[in-house]
């Protein structure tokens, strides 16, 4: 084009000299991470942090070097589920992640606040900035699989995180309620825009097994996991029951003792997922 300014970020033309602008941010120069899996949900409270934690526990139990990046800055629940109350240390050379009992590296807003009950009352740009700094400023030590507990929804904050961190794949967490199809569709579309595969759909609180008669009850409606998985070409689905035992382990900071079998198929997809590629 005769009037080309060579600034592709402000031009919509699809000409032959177009350079794709990448917003991907580099890792800390001493950090190394092979795979990054984002765990996302349409709204809060569906069990996204629980699924993120269970996937990390499963990966660690299988001998992988695992990291958990809690990008849910205003609702950080990962450290509590692991019973981690220590503080991340750091200086101008980088932040050292905290470690769980089984050796999972972790960073969360709660590991930086003086009192973990302090609320984070920040504007969106600051919240997104903090989540991205967890990627760029933490000295992640030789990580095979990093799991990111994403901020819920598809607003500015998750969008900045998606644009800044290279991902191997995404896992979507839902409950079997009516609007779930719209949530899955949005997540799949968003992942498609970022060129990231959706590896799994975890339907949490899918059923409840009566402890007296052993019958399965669908408290939040019939399961949609399998149908949606097929409709949106998601290679693995999981159904996680409402489980008072898991809730009590999460509350007691003992999630590393939980049974992770329901997530086996999704985890198998994570094992096959591509490693991230970016230039430092
Ligand atoms: P989110 O990250 O989506 O906001 P959480 O993972 O923090 O949601 O879960 C919210 C609460 O529900 C937590 O107290 C968690 O222990 C509980 N919970 C989540 N899934 C289950 C389940 N399948 N059975 C029992 N309790 C659950």
Image (tube, rainbow, N blue to C red):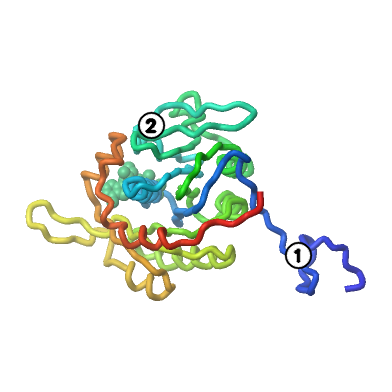
221 in relation to 128, above or below:
below
Q: Position of residue 178 (x, y in %)?
A: 36, 65
In the picture, measured across the screen, residue 29 lies left or right of residue 114, that is: right
Disc 1 residue crowd, few under 14, some 14–19, many 20+, Cα 10 Å: few
Q: Nearer the viewer, residue 271 or 225?
A: 271
- Circle 2 sits on which residue? 84
Q: Alpha-carbon distance for marks 1 and 2?
A: 44 Å
Residue that appears at 38% across and 70% down: 229
- Circle 1 sits on which residue? 19
Residue 173 in view here? yes
Q: Nearer the viewer, residue 233 or 231?
A: 233
Residue that appears at 52% across and 32% down: 96
Residue 123 in view here? no
Quadrant occupied by the N terminus: bottom right
Which comes before the other along the chain, label 1 or label 2?
1
The secondary structure type at the circle numbered 1 is loop
The secondary structure type at the circle numbered 2 is loop
Q: Residue furthest left?
A: 213
33 in relation to 90, above or below:
below
Q: Position of residue 149 (x, y in %)?
A: 46, 47
Q: Nearer the viewer, residue 195 or 26?
A: 26
Label 2 near ligand 1 (CB < 8 Å):
no
Q: Residue furthest top?
A: 114
Residue that appears at 38% across and 31% down: 84
Q: Foreground mark, 1 or 2?
A: 1
| Corner quadrant of residue 136 | top right
Q: Nearer the viewer, residue 274 or 15?
A: 274
């Amino acid at each position: 084009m005769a009037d080309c300014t060579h600034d592709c970020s402000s031009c919509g033309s699809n000409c032959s000299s177009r350079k794709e602008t990448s917003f991907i941010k580099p890792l800390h120069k001493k950090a190394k991470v092979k795979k990054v899996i984002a765990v996302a949900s349409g709204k809060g409270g569906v069990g996204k942090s629980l699924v993120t934690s269970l996937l990390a526990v499963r990966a660690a139990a299988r001998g992988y070097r695992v990291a958990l990046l809690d990008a849910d800055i205003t609702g950080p629940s990962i450290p509590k589920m692991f019973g981690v109350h220590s503080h991340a240390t750091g200086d101008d050379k980088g932040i050292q992640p905290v470690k769980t009992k089984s050796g999972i590296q972790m960073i969360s807003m709660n590991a930086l606040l003086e009192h973990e009950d302090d609320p984070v009352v920040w504007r969106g740009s600051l919240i997104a900035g903090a989540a991205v700094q967890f990627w760029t400023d933490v000295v992640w030590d030789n990580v095979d699989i990093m799991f990111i507990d994403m901020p819920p929804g598809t607003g500015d904050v998750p969008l900045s995180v998606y644009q800044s961190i290279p991902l191997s794949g995404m896992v979507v967490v839902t409950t079997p309620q009516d609007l779930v199809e719209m949530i899955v569709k949005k997540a799949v579309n968003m992942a498609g825009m970022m060129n990231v595969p959706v590896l799994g759909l975890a339907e949490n609180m899918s059923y409840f097994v009566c402890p007296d008669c052993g019958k399965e009850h669908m408290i939040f409606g019939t399961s949609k996991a399998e149908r949606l998985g097929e409709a949106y070409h998601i290679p693995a689905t999981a159904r996680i029951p409402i489980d008072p035992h898991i809730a009590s382990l999460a509350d007691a900071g003992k999630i590393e003792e939980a049974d992770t079998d329901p997530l086996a198929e999704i985890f198998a997809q994570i094992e096959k997922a591509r490693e991230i590629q970016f230039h430092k």
